[in-house]
Image (tube, helix red, strand yellow):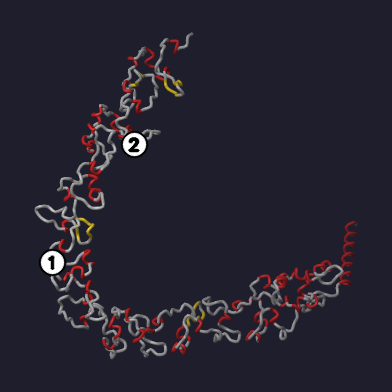
């Protein structure tokens, strides 16, 4: 019974609600708003007690709100912006009521921000305002809208040029008609049309083909760097590809090559008097146009005798330019280019660059002597290298390619009283022969100290290197190659001492100062003179420690030590005890050492007394 009562109450309330709605609603909503039917949805559009709110309208029509905020489109114009939404788009007039209505024929499309001109002004609105032209998915699904169109041509029209030209179609086309392109001006391109080109049909250059299944005409990517890109070269590229040097765009038969053709691009560039000649002087202009001006093909500038008579009758060869040039046969502007090899004296090296007048003082045909260098050159050495038996010539040591490049070899030097050996072979000549401003080859000394500084003078006794001869210790192969007999000093090197570098003992030690090569006569020959006495003075006798009494110089092991020779002979179990069991570390003078010397050998010193 309780459930039946609740149900009856709900049905009464529902009936009351419908009665109230029928009393409050001024009429049915249009189909586009029918989802807002019911008194519970009134506030979706209305403010309680007031009219429809523009803000609430725009909260649903967000795409229109964006346009208004951007000050774009019809709803952003001052005539519309000042009105409320409901003043134009009111509702509650029935489901079939048209909320958006205007006269398409009188509507001023310019207020949308896009003026309709040409063919655009004549077509039906639906031709453009259709879902297929709307990219925004949310706007496209609307059943009735004029929003969502892009002003770009490609938004409605197919790109005939298939992305090969600018997307701004208005650069060339107008809305009146796609063809022809009235705004396109060929003179603004990189190839302005002049002469016969101005009357040629566009299709002659801009070919039409099928691309991606559609007709496509080429307007970009056309090569025009040379006439031969489009035209057949009647000269078969024999005259280059600059046709405009001889022809014009008005007529191919009009020849202007007399003043424009660049003859330098051929194998025969024109110079001097050749520039002033008429083409007919060399070329037969009556030949077929396809071969005209090619009758001298292959002739080079040095082939003078192909046109001119050789007045020298072949005596100096056929290369006339060695002496003559195109400015005039009698003008010898290049006598230095003359092939001197045709004479009895061949010019080589530096002689090739010498001015002819330096040798030929008078006429070029006057004979000159050339049997020795000194005939023309001054003896730089002033007779220093001459010998009684004969007078030496410069060519024995020098060449014509450069005076500084001497041909004097090691073998030649080894025939003198001073043979070059070892590092002396790698020493530049000037190190010995040009110590001063001039070269000197005689009486320059033959001893080491004549060239080298004796850094050991006063520090090594003369008996070890008589007459300061470095060879007593060093060799010419390498200064560090030492072969000194150390037994002469009274201190024979053996064991590890024989393997050490000299400077290991004779060099400066850390903290020492002075010349590192001069520590020879002042060196201490005792072991402690070089080595640290790790035992301090435990084994010193008369103030000296003789390490060799226990150690050898090979491995430093105490192979010479015999415990039986000490004051404590090892007997019994003592023979098996490790050295460290008795000889322990102690600290003496802030140094840790191993104690080997004992004053007391009583048992209780090492063993515990029970």
Q: Is residue 184 above or below residue 393?
A: below
Residue 510 point in image, percent of width and height: 39, 33
In the rendered structure, the answer to whether residue 9 lies left or right of residue 102 reads right
Residue 151 location (% of width, % of height) = 63, 77
Q: Position of residue 201 (x, y in %)?
A: 47, 88
Q: Residue at x 63, y 86 (%)?
A: 118
Q: Which mark is residue 516?
A: 2
Residue under numbered circle 1? 369
Report helix, strand or loop for mark 2.
Answer: loop
Can residue 428 be spotted in the picture?
no
Q: Quadrant of residue 21?
A: bottom right
Along the line of sight, the residue nearer the viewer: 127 or 174: 174
Task: Please indicate whether residue 2 sits to the left or right of residue 60 in the image.
Answer: right
Name the foreground residue: 586 vs 405: 405
Figure check: 378 above or below 76: above
- Alpha carbon distance from label 1 to label 2: 62 Å
- The image quadrant that residue 539 belongs to is top left
Q: Is residue 149 left or right of residue 382?
A: right
Give the numbered dot on residue 266.
none
Residue placed most toward the observer, 183 or 368: 368
Q: Residue visible at 59% across and 84% down?
A: 174
Q: Mark 1 vs mark 2: which is more N-terminal?
A: 1
């Amino acid at each position: 019974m309780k459930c039946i009562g609740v149900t009856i109450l709900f049905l009464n309330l529902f009936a009351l609600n419908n009665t109230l709605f029928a009393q409050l609603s001024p009429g049915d909503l249009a189909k586009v708003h029918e989802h807002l039917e019911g008194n519970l949805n009134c506030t979706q559009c209305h403010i309680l007690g007031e009219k429809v709110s523009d803000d609430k309208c725009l909260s649903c029509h967000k795409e229109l709100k964006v346009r208004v905020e951007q000050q774009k489109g019809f709803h952003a114009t001052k005539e519309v912006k000042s009105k409320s939404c409901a003043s134009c788009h009111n509702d509650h007039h029935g489901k079939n009521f048209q909320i958006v209505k205007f006269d398409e024929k009188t509507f001023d499309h310019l207020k949308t921000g896009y003026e309709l001109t040409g063919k655009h002004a004549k077509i039906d609105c639906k031709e453009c305002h259709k879902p297929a032209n709307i990219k925004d998915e949310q706007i496209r699904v609307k059943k009735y809208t004029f929003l969502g169109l892009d002003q770009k041509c490609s938004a409605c029209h197919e790109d005939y040029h298939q992305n090969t030209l600018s997307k701004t179609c208005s650069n060339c086309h107008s809305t009146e008609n796609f063809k022809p392109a009235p705004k396109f001006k060929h003179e603004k391109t990189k190839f302005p049309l002049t002469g016969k080109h101005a009357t040629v049909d566009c299709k002659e250059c801009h070919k039409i083909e099928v691309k991606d299944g559609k007709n496509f005409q080429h307007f970009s990517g056309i090569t025009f760097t040379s006439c031969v890109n489009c035209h057949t070269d009647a000269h078969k590229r024999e005259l280059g590809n600059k046709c405009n040097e001889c022809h014009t765009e008005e007529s191919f038969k009009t020849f202007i090559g007399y003043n424009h053709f660049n003859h330098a691009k051929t194998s025969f560039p024109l110079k001097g008097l050749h520039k002033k000649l008429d083409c007919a002087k060399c070329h037969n202009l009556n030949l077929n146009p396809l071969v005209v001006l090619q009758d001298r093909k292959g002739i080079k500038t040095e082939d003078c005798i192909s046109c001119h008579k050789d007045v020298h009758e072949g005596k100096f060869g056929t290369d006339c330019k060695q002496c003559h040039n195109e400015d005039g046969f009698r003008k010898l502007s290049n006598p230095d280019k003359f092939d001197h090899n045709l004479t009895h004296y061949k010019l080589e090296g530096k002689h090739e660059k010498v001015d002819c007048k330096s040798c030929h003082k008078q006429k070029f045909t006057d004979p000159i002597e050339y049997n020795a260098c000194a005939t023309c050159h001054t003896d730089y050495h002033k007779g220093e290298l001459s010998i009684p038996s004969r007078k030496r010539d410069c060519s024995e040591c020098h060449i014509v390619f450069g005076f500084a490049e001497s041909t004097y070899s090691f073998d030649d030097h080894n025939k003198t009283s001073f043979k070059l050996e070892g590092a002396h072979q790698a020493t530049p000549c000037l190190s010995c022969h040009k110590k001063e401003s001039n070269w000197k080859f005689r009486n320059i000394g033959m001893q080491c100290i004549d060239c080298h500084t004796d850094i050991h003078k006063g520090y090594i006794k003369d008996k070890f290197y008589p007459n300061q001869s470095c060879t007593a210790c060093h060799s010419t192969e390498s200064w560090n190659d030492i072969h000194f007999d150390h037994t002469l000093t009274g201190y024979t090197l053996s064991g590890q001492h024989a393997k050490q570098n000299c400077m290991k003992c004779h060099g400066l030690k850390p903290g020492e100062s002075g010349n590192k090569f001069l520590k020879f006569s002042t060196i201490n020959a005792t072991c402690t003179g070089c080595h640290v006495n790790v035992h301090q003075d435990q084994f010193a006798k008369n103030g000296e420690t003789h390490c060799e009494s226990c150690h050898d110089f090979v491995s430093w092991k105490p192979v010479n030590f015999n415990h039986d020779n000490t004051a404590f002979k090892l007997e019994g179990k003592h023979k098996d005890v490790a050295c460290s069991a008795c000889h322990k570390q102690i600290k003496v003078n802030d140094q840790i050492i191993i104690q080997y010397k004992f004053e007391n050998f009583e048992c209780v010193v090492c063993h515990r007394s029970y």
